[in-house]
Amino acid sequence: MSQTAPSHGRVLKEALTFDDVLLVPDHSRVHPKDTSVKTRLTQRITMNVPILSAAMDTVTEATMAIAMAREGGAGVIHKNMPIDRQADQVDRVKRSESGMIMKPITLGPEASLRDAHQLMAQYSISGVPIVEPDGRLVGIITNRDLQFESDLDRPVTALMTSEGLITAPIGTTLDQAEEVLHSHRIEKLPVTDEEGRLRGLITVKDIFKRRQFPNACKDEHGRLRVGAAIGASVADLDRARALVEAGADFLVIDTAHGHSEGVLQAVARTKEAFPDQDLIAGNVGTFDGAKALVDRGVDAVKVGVGPGSICTTRVVTGVGLPQLTAIMDAVDGVDGRVPV
């Protein structure tokens, strides 16, 4: 009598993707214009629009990240570039606009007009504060000062505004700054301490952008938020360090299979080195994968193995899980500890 060999496989539960379900309409008391889609990216970072642009070299660099953050989302700068260039991309986003520029680009009194011209062109700015080595503000030079100047080898002190320089004390609000800018018909307002050292810079451009993009995703200093991708190797700690120093709001360990020992070790290393830095890791598609990442210290879990409309992961490898079920399982796995 023949006997059937025991099966070592198992049939998984029914799994669904977004195309498999519909939301049932019901009575609503909320007008569309009053609808809020504000959400948490991590426990400490909120977004007004729950959309991230992918950390792909064909998708997100500084320009895309700035556009995303202005609309309320955020961009993740891809890692397929040298460390210094990726850090520069992050810095460009953080400097693109600000409530108050915390670390304004400056020049010393010994700099030439050519230096000022090159700096303005490099960072797309219209003026540069001039400071002594001890940080004391001595003047400001703008692109209007340089418009008709032919001898760019002259020192900046020859054309900078120094007499009657309008400044504001630390603690000046944006509303107060706007009144000063308007009353004195100026575009830049240096913020100084009691000793006259430069502590920040408020510009009329940033005030206008605040009105133009009221839903922008910004940090506590009024700067646009931006994320940056890193890999899972030990060497990526150097990349992470440069990105943190450049001002990245969050790091993303972005891999095809987040529930792997290499990724889990990378999460632990990164959180140990930068305990105050928000860290997102993935991608995972299961309860166990999400739980493992949270147990190692991530601040949010990235879910999805092959869910993209043009992604071929599931077709080529036969690996993946329908996205709706993957998200539901991941939510159960994190057990409310971090966002998914």
Image (cartoon, helix red, strand yellow):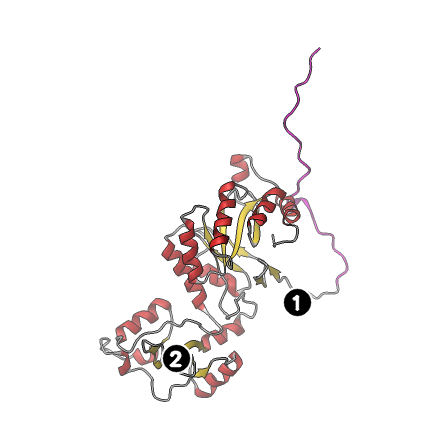
40 or 290: nearer the eye? 290
Tell me if mark 2 has few (under 14), some (14-19) or many (20+) residues whose alpha carbon lies within 10 angstroms of its own. Answer: some
- Residue 239 is covered by the magenta coloring: no
Q: Which image quadrant for residue 166?
A: bottom left
134 or 26: nearer the eye? 134
Is residue 215 found left or right of 325 in the rendered image? left
Query: Residue 168's x, y, as percent?
Result: 45, 83
Q: Look at the magenta stretch and give its main secondary structure.
A: loop
Q: Tell me what residue is drawn at x 66 percent, y 47 percent.
A: 332
Is residue 324 found left or right of 115 in the rendered image? right
Q: Which residue is label 1 attached to?
A: 33
- Residue 13 is covered by the magenta coloring: yes
Query: Residue 111's x, y, as percent?
Result: 27, 75
For the question of whether residue 213 can be seen, the reply is: yes
Residue type pointed to by label 1: Lys
Query: Residue 157's x, y, as percent?
Result: 28, 81
Can you say whether 274 is above or below 219 in the image? above
Residues in magenta, as a range: 1-28
CA distance separating discs 2 and 1: 45 Å
Q: Which residue is label 2 attached to?
A: 197
Residue type pointed to by label 2: Arg
In what quadrant of the picture does the N terminus appear?
Answer: top right
Name the residue furthest top: 1
